Image (cartoon, rainbow, N blue to C red):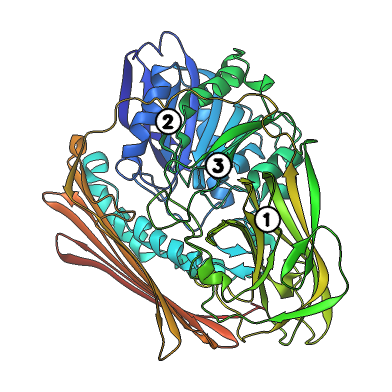
Amino acid sequence: MPAIRTIEHVFIPLADGTRLAARLWLPEDAEARPVPAILEYIPYRKRDGTRGRDEPMHGWFAANGYAAIRVDMRGSGESDGLLHDEYLPQELGDACEVIAWLAAQSWCTGAVGMMGKSWGGFNCLQVAALRPPALKAVLTVCSTDDRYADDIHFMGGCLLNDNLWWGSIMLAYQARPADPALVGEAWRAQWQQRLDQLPFFPALWLAHQRRDAYWRHGSICEDFSAVQCPVFAVGGWGDAYTNAIPRLLEGLRGPRLGLIGPWAHIYPQDGVPGPAIGFLQEAKRWWDHWLKGEDHGIMAEPMLRAFIEEWSPPGHRDPAPGRFVGEMRWPSPGIAAETLHLAPGVLRSAAGVGAEVSFSSPAWTGMAAGEWMGTGVAGEEPTDQRHDDAFSCLFDGEILEESLELLGAAVLEVELASDKPLAQLCARLCDVAPDGSSRRIAYGVLNLSHRDSHAEPEALEPGRFYPVRLQLGDCGYALAPGHRLRLALSTAYWPLIWPSPEAARLTLRCPGRLNLPVRRGGEAGPAVSFEPPESAARAPITQLAAGRMARIAALDLLTNQASYVTEGEGGLFGEGVLRFDEIDTSLSHSLRRELTIKGDDPLSARYRLTESYDMGREGWRIHIEVKTGMHADAHDFFLDGEIKASLNGEPAADRRWNIRIPRDLL
């Protein structure tokens, strides 16, 4: 590869005197021959937190003619200040200043692109809506345009249990100090300030149970026209943020592309489940077009390139069977809605006579759901859905005589009545094989008090029928001949979502409608292929200890209590205890989750997390412990938390929270 120069640490000054810490990768001759800049801007510590991922990706961009910059946001890593919450105006304003600073550097042509995954994918869209002059294009991976509908806090007006999981991880992440090897003696006072003012993140988010101004801020779907620069949106069916990609392609009016693979919450050059692709080469073609004015044909290719998954037994699969297809426009004229009608126990093409079906699921229904957000590790994918099908109201289609290919979102339209004022509807679309095994294709959940509005929910009148529309998550999937389609409905989806306060019985009037996004193109259409993955050299890493993963679902037949336990020991996702050799820094992150609930008592739900984070080197050892928990009664949520931090065994902080938050039709 061409020679590059890596700058381990530099401060970017902001107008208010704050300094943001950055790591740079530059072509060796960038001072003599300036290049465009690519910015990634996140709070996860460029020094050690994302070093293993940054080095091969940003080093590759530098070797291919770009300046790559990883900036830690205010209050994270070696940057000054405090981080108070996600996506605040301060965060976005700081990014605009960073972009202006980059454009003014002697090694930069003045053209800047912004990219990122997850948090970095969110904020590059949000920054694009502010239109900083030097920002010419963005590449957003595993992100969302709607912070309420499609983020880690709420889904369909239901509380995601990952709200507490992510909030607990953020407590540990934000309790990490700056590295004294870079910032000197000032690190200790800065660390103490961060510890003393650390917010209790789960409660910040749970306090906003409706789609209010808090969530509308940073949701670019509120005004797609604000984003005028080109957008390349990327995700995977194994991730939780993929629904945003079709919305972005439909809602944006500027140049735009979408790419959806089989991957989890991972950059596609490392994509799991595979096949991984040469994503950095695709990104370079994008940046060459918009930052250098070099046309390599990427904008003449399909607007959406998507992976169509095919059957394999439920569980972890790597690589995933299937193929990529291309749609020149989105919405695609090659995809048409095909309606199936609900009759008791069946899905059929013709509407039948009226009938009613009632169902009520045990509160622990959903134990086969897998994780809300996949990270590419074994055990997180949905398991055989027969575990949950047994406690759901099922509607089965006929055995297929030919392949049925879906690309987009299925929509369920039904009339429902509940015997309780609050209730949940959970819908799963499954592929049932000839042997009876059931693979989840897509799912959706809806807090029925949010049936008409997430901003202004209304309780149900027991016994009254309401029209309900539930859009399931987008999918790309081909059902094979000999298989059948199944719609499974339940009144609970634990442990993904927190239950309603009472066990409800729903009554559904048939015939309802299931509208499927059927792709008629089959094998026709533009050919889609990718180069093999490439990257620069990885950061030298030594594994000091192996990781251990556990994932256990159990049902106590005497108490009717289900438990769901996951544990990552040594590494959050099983990666083990690692040392970055160049900076002599070791990292160990362990977390245990325990969720329990009784099948006949939604108020018995309990959630506990225990977490530890160790980092440092000889003479500088940081230890962080986090404990959080949640339960609820009919009127309130109760959250508790504790964080302890120490330096070389000496206590540095001991913070505790006990917070009560009223339930708001949730």
User: Circle 2 sits on which residue?
Assistant: 69
Query: Upstream in the sequence, badge 2 or badge 3?
Result: 2
Residue type at mark 2: give it: Ile
> In the rendered image, which residue does mark 3 sit on?
235
Mark 3 falls on what kind of element?
Answer: strand
Task: Report the Cα–Cα distance between label 2 and label 3.
Answer: 22 Å
Residue 48 lies in what quarter of the image? top left
Please tell me whether mark 1 sits on a helix, a strand or a loop: loop
Q: Please report the residue visible at 14 percent of the width from the left and 59 percent of the height from the top.
A: 648
Quadrant showing the N terminus: top left
Q: Residue at x 36, y 45 (%)?
A: 45
Residue found 41% across the figure and 14% down from its top: 30
Asked if disc 3 and disc 1 are in contact, CB closer than 8 Å, the reply is: no
Relative depth, front residue between 403 and 466:
403
Label 3 sits on what residue type? Gly
The disc at residue 230 is: none
CA gap between label 2 and label 1 equals 53 Å
Taking the image as drawn, is residue 10 in sight? no
Q: Secondary structure at mark 2?
A: strand
- 29 or 243, which lies in front? 243
Q: Nearer the viewer, mark 2 or mark 1?
A: 1
Instruction: Categorize mark 1 by other alpha carbons within 10 Å: few (<14), some (14-19), many (20+).
Output: some
Q: Which residue is mark 1?
A: 399
Q: CA distance from mark 3 to mark 1?
A: 32 Å
